[in-house]
């Protein structure tokens, strides 16, 4: 699935999310966020933002809470 927020592909980073059943009723969610260089001078800021406690960790925690 591709999400399109209007950003040109060569100016965007890439997020890959996979869901794998670990056991009945249990799913492992893996997030890989790369290609930050597409953000140009904002690349390091984006990398820090998603690595921060309010970045992917919080997003995944909210997701887990929502689907539980």
Image (cartoon, grey):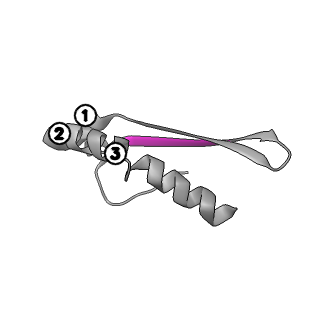
- Judge the density around disc 2: few (<14), some (14-19), many (≥20) Cα neighbours within 10 Å: few
- For residue 35, which quarter of the picture? top left
Residue that lies at the very extreme toward the right in this rendered image: 24
Residue 55 horizontal/vertical position (percent): 38, 50
> Callout 1: few (<14), some (14-19), or many (20+) C-alpha neighbours within 10 Å?
some
Q: Position of residue 15 (x, y in %)?
A: 45, 43
Residue at figure coordinates x 47%, y 55% from the top left: 59
Specify start and end residues of the magenta stretch as a single range. Answer: 14-19
- Residue 34 vs residue 68, the one in the foreground: 68
Q: Nearer the viewer, residue 22 or 53?
A: 53
The quarter holding residue 14 reads: top left
Check if mark 2's residue and mark 1's residue have beta carbons within 8 Å: yes
* Whole-number angstrom distance, CA of label 2 to CA of label 1: 5 Å
Horizontal arrangement in the rendering, residue 67 relative to residue 42 (left or right): right
Question: Element at badge 1?
Answer: helix
Which image quadrant is residue 58 in?
Answer: bottom left
| Dominant secondary structure (helix, strand or loop) of the stretch shown in magenta | strand
């Amino acid at each position: 699935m591709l999400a399109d927020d209007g950003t040109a592909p060569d100016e965007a980073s890439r997020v890959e999310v996979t869901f794998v059943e670990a056991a009945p009723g249990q799913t492992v969610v893996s997030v890989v966020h790369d290609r930050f260089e597409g953000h140009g001078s904002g690349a390091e800021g984006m990398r820090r933002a998603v690595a921060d406690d309010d970045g992917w960790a919080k997003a995944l925690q909210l997701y887990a809470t929502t689907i539980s």
